[in-house]
């Protein structure tokens, strides 16, 4: 009963605390500098204001935290707007992921796209490991994805690390003349001739 009462009260309370992200206060240079010095590995560019007065967002890679203006206290976790349902931290993460993916060109990934006349409706980028069971399952369903207008772009992420057997297989695929066929062969357990080349694995 108490939890139901709390759920009814929290949205109203949060409506007074959270405001629209776009009206966040202009960051104080003094506060930004203090926070950047307080959090290891953070520079001024990694500090941004939030909709909450006196609270700043800090970012290191895909890790986020929220720090008081004096640089003393930090809250680790995601910031949510309970009034609108927006996941503000996740929105920041999505932007970072898009920027990361934009660094890769056609030579970095292997793409399986729908065959005309099927139009491309969606493009997904998948980090894959040749020895991963679920990755192989996804690849077995490639015809179904393509038939539904979904193009799949693979980037390699050998979970066992660089220099591992999984990495060797990925490199053999990336350096093959027909990379798409080599990847299909490898995911179906066939050997691909070992070779090396410059790559983005």
Image (tube, rainbow, N blue to C red):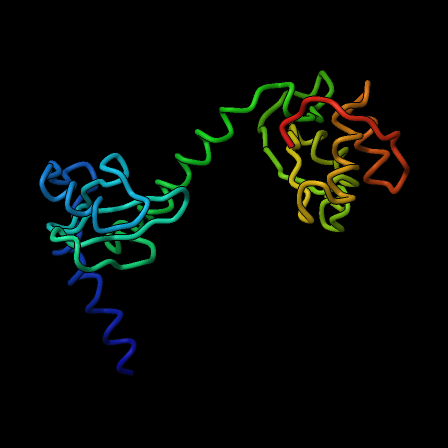
Q: How many marks?
A: 0
Image spot of residue 56 (x, y percent): 19, 47
Name the residue located 19 percent from the left edge and 47 percent from the top edge.
35
Image spot of residue 163 (x, y percent): 72, 41
- Does residue 122 appear to the left or right of 136 in the view shown? left
- Does 35 sit above or below residue 11? above
Image spot of residue 27 (x, y percent): 13, 38
Query: Residue 111 occupies which quadrant of the picture?
Result: top right
Name the residue located 88 percent from the left edge and 29 percent from the top edge.
193
Of the pair 117 and 46, the residue shown nearer to us: 46
Image spot of residue 138 (x, y percent): 72, 43
Of the pair 180 and 38, the residue shown nearer to us: 38
- Does residue 138 appear to the left or right of 190 in the view shown? left
Of the pair 50 and 15, the residue shown nearer to us: 50
Query: Residue 169 occupies which quadrant of the picture?
Result: top right
Name the residue located 74 percent from the left edge and 44 percent from the top edge.
164
Query: Residue 153 occupies which quadrant of the picture?
Result: top right
- Does 159 sit above or below residue 26? below
- Does residue 23 appear to the left or right of 187 in the view shown? left
- Does 77 sit above or below residue 64? below
Can you say which quadrant of the picture contains the N terminus? Answer: bottom left
Q: Residue furthest bottom?
A: 1
Can you say which quadrant of the picture contains the C terminus? Answer: top right
- Does residue 79 appear to the left or right of 20 in the view shown? right
């Amino acid at each position: 009963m108490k939890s139901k009462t709390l759920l009814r009260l929290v949205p109203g309370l949060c409506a007074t605390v959270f405001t629209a992200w776009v009206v966040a206060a202009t960051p104080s240079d003094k506060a930004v500098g203090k926070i950047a010095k307080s959090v290891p590995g953070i520079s001024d560019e990694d500090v941004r204001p939030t909709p909450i007065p006196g609270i700043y967002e800090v970012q290191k890679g895909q890790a986020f935290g929220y720090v008081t203006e004096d640089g003393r206290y930090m809250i680790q976790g995601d910031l949510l707007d309970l009034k609108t349902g927006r996941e503000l931290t996740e929105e920041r993460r999505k932007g970072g992921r898009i920027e990361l993916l934009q660094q890769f060109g056609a030579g970095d990934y292997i793409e399986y796209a729908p065959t005309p006349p099927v139009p491309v409706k969606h493009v997904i980028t998948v980090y894959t490991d040749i020895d991963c069971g679920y990755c192989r399952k996804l690849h077995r369903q490639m015809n179904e994805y393509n038939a539904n207008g979904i193009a799949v772009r693979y980037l390699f992420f050998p979970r066992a690390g660089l220099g591992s057997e999984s990495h060797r297989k990925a490199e053999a695929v990336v350096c093959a003349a027909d990379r798409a066929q080599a990847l299909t062969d490898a995911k179906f357990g066939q050997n691909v001739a070992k070779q090396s080349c410059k790559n983005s694995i």
